[in-house]
Image (cartoon, rainbow, N blue to C red):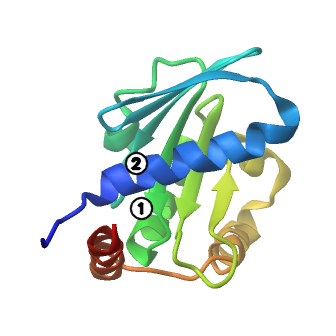
């Protein structure tokens, strides 16, 4: 049986597993709900809504469904196009409170993710070296592409 998997569903499941594993020590998460392209995390101290957009063209548009949330995030794959979209939208993103962005490559031989809070990062970094600093974080995770993600996700679906 040749079963195709959706990269967004795969990324949402990866984020859910990551958040649960990270919480093993803290024990703050009360519940995680998967609702379409959203992962909603109810914690003892806050609730966070993540939107899953594997391949983002425009961060501002992609984030619009969660902008009104007090704590929000977005998970994307670690692609050069997603990095370019981040840099294009940086001025806007760095003004958004409580935004966290996960760049993920579950198939990486290095780290599997890098995380950035644009507002905090903007406050502590100098503008001259912004691109180089963000690129250095990007390089800690193997770069992937939409084609490679689709191939890996479908290969893994075939093994199930």
Image point 65% across, 42% down: which residue?
19
Q: Where does the image place residue 6, in percent across and percent down from the top left?
A: 25, 57
Q: Nearer the viewer, residue 70 or 147?
A: 147
Tell me which residue sits at (73%, 69%) in the image.
128
Question: 69 and 34: which one is in front?
Answer: 34
Vertically, is 142 above or below 49?
A: below
Disc sitting over residue 85 in the figure: 1
Corner quadrant of residue 26:
top right
| Quarter containing the N terminus | bottom left
Q: Is residue 73 left or right of residue 128?
A: left
Image location (x, y in percent) of residue 141: 63, 76
- Crowdedness of circle 1 by 10 Å Cα count: few (<14), some, many (20+)? some
In the displayed structure, 129 sits above or below 10; it is: below
Residue 66 drawn at (x, y percent): 43, 27
Quarter occupied by residue 76: bottom left
Query: Do the residues under discs 1 and 2 have CB atoms within 8 angstroms?
Result: yes
Please tell me which residue is depicted at 28% across the width and 80% down the height of the picture.
151
Q: Residue at x 39, y 33 (%)?
A: 38
- Number of numbered tags placed on the structure image: 2
Q: Where residue 8 appears, x then y in whole percent?
A: 33, 52
Image quarter hosting the C terminus: bottom left
Residue to which mark 2 is pinned: 59
- SS for callout 2: helix
Label of residue 15 in the image: none
Q: Nearer the viewer, residue 126 or 82?
A: 82
* Residue 94 visible to the viewer: no
Q: Classify mark 2: residues with Cα within 10 Å, few (<14), some (14-19) or many (20+).
A: many
Can see residue 39?
Answer: yes
Which residue is farthest left? Answer: 1
């Amino acid at each position: 049986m040749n079963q195709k998997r959706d990269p967004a569903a795969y990324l949402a499941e990866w984020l859910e597993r990551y958040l649960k594993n990270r919480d093993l020590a803290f024990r703050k998460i009360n519940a995680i709900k998967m609702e379409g392209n959203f992962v909603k995390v109810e914690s003892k101290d806050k609730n966070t809504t993540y939107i899953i957009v594997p391949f983002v063209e425009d961060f501002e548009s992609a984030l619009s469904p969660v902008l009104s949330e007090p704590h929000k995030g977005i998970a994307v794959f670690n692609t050069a196009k997603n990095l370019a979209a981040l840099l294009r939208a940086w001025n806007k993103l760095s003004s958004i409170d409580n935004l966290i962005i996960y760049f993920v490559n579950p198939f990486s031989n290095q780290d599997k993710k890098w995380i950035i809070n644009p507002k905090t990062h903007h406050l502590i970094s100098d503008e001259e070296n912004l691109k180089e600093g963000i690129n250095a974080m990007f390089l800690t995770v193997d770069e992937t592409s939409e084609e490679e993600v689709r191939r890996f996700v479908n290969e893994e679906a075939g093994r199930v």
